[in-house]
Structures are given as structure tokens and as C-alpha cells.
Amino acid sequence: MENQIIKIRQANADDAQTLTDLAYTTFWDAFAHHPKNAPDDLNHYMRQAFSLEQTTAELLDEKSIFLIAEFENAVAGYAKIILDNIEPGITAERPVELNRLYSHQKYLGQGIGQKLMDACFGRARLEGRDVMWLGVWEFNPRAQRFYEKNGFRVVGSHVFQLGSDAQTDLLMQKEL
């Protein structure tokens, strides 16, 4: 791993198709095989959240910042932060939401997620943010441990609508 360099860059409108494919694949890999996720609910959510039109609109939104991780000459993962987004339970004056952070299954354990997390922290500080927050599924202990290791703490919960399934996400925040 030491000789492999993970590069992080900000995505732009030209990355819309790449990001759409990456978002769809990584979300599917992360959640499709969990017994609590009904295939119909997952498919309904993914068709809406990860269409080319939706990704393009998000890329053009000035409050959304996408970061892409490249490793071994391939797109390995991505993160999305949203400036000034906040929910009840989050205590911040200049918040930033870590909306997504995913890497391809084949790169798990290679440091992609941590490199993206560090880049998100750096970008949030550059933007003068005081708190980063996120929602993480209550049945995703691996992600919860990752966020705890990075200084996040649980401050509440909210509903994440996956198709017809109202799921519970833990709200976590970290002061920057």
C-alpha cells in the first residue's frame, strides 16, 4: 500500500456519468445484501438517487462538493459534502454535512475511505465550517466505528426513507 498513491480531486460536471455509476455500484454493494433491505425499496431509492439527471443536478449545486478518490489508475471511491445543511439535533453555526462516503468493495481496507474523510475535513476547514455531521444507518456498525474513530459522536437520529421503508439513521457530529 505504501507505494500506491491515493489521489483526491474535486469532481466537476464532466464527472456526472462516472459519479452516477460509482454511486450506484457502491451503494448497491454496501446495502443490497443486508436482510433488512427489501429489493423493491432499494431499487426504488436507487433509481431516484443515482440517476444521471440527479447526479448532474447535484454537481451543479454550489453547496454540494464531490470529491473523487483515484487509486491504481481507477476511480476507487467518492465523498459528497453539503455546505450549510443542518437538521434538528446538530449544534453548529457553520455546518457541513458529510452526505456520502463510499469506496468500491475491491478497495476496502486500502485507505480510500480514510483519505476521503481527511480530504472532507480539510475542505470543510477551508470553507470555514465549525461542525461536520452525518447520518449513518443504525444497522451499519462498520461505518459507525469508522466515524467514531474519526471523532464523530452520536447526537440523535432521523428517518432515512429507503423506498417505502422508513429506516433509522444515527446522527453524528464532530466539531472542527
Image (cartoon, rainbow, N blue to C red):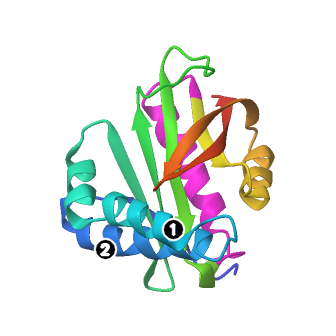
Quadrant showing the N terminus: bottom right
36 to 160, vertically: above or below:
below
Q: Position of residue 8 (x, y in %)?
A: 46, 62
Q: Which residue is painted at 27% across and 58% down in the image?
A: 55
Q: Residues within 10 Å of mark 2 (few under 14, many from 20)?
A: some
Q: Which of the two labelled residues, at mark 1 and mark 2, occupies the earlier sequence position? A: 2
Report if residue 112 lies within the magenta region: yes
Does dot 2 land on a helix, a strand or a loop? helix
Where, by quadrant of the figure, is residue 114 drawn?
bottom right
Question: Is residue 12 at least partly visible in the picture?
Answer: no
Question: In the shown orientation, is residue 83 left or right of residue 134?
Answer: left
The residue under label 1 is which amino acid type?
A: Phe
Residue interval drawn in magenta: 108-131
The residue under label 2 is which amino acid type?
A: Thr
Magenta span: helix, strand or loop, mainly?
A: helix
Quadrant showing the C terminus: top right
Question: Is residue 128 at least partly visible in the picture?
Answer: yes
71 to 124, vertically: above or below:
below
Report if residue 89 lies within the magenta region: no
Q: Which residue is painted at 32% across and 59% down in the image?
A: 48
Q: Residues within 10 Å of mark 1 (few under 14, many from 20)?
A: some
Q: Position of residue 133 (x, y in %)?
A: 59, 34
Q: Position of residue 9 (x, y in %)?
A: 39, 60
Does dot 1 land on a helix, a strand or a loop? helix
Q: Which residue is mark 2?
A: 18
Q: Which residue is painted at 47% across and 69% down in the image?
A: 40
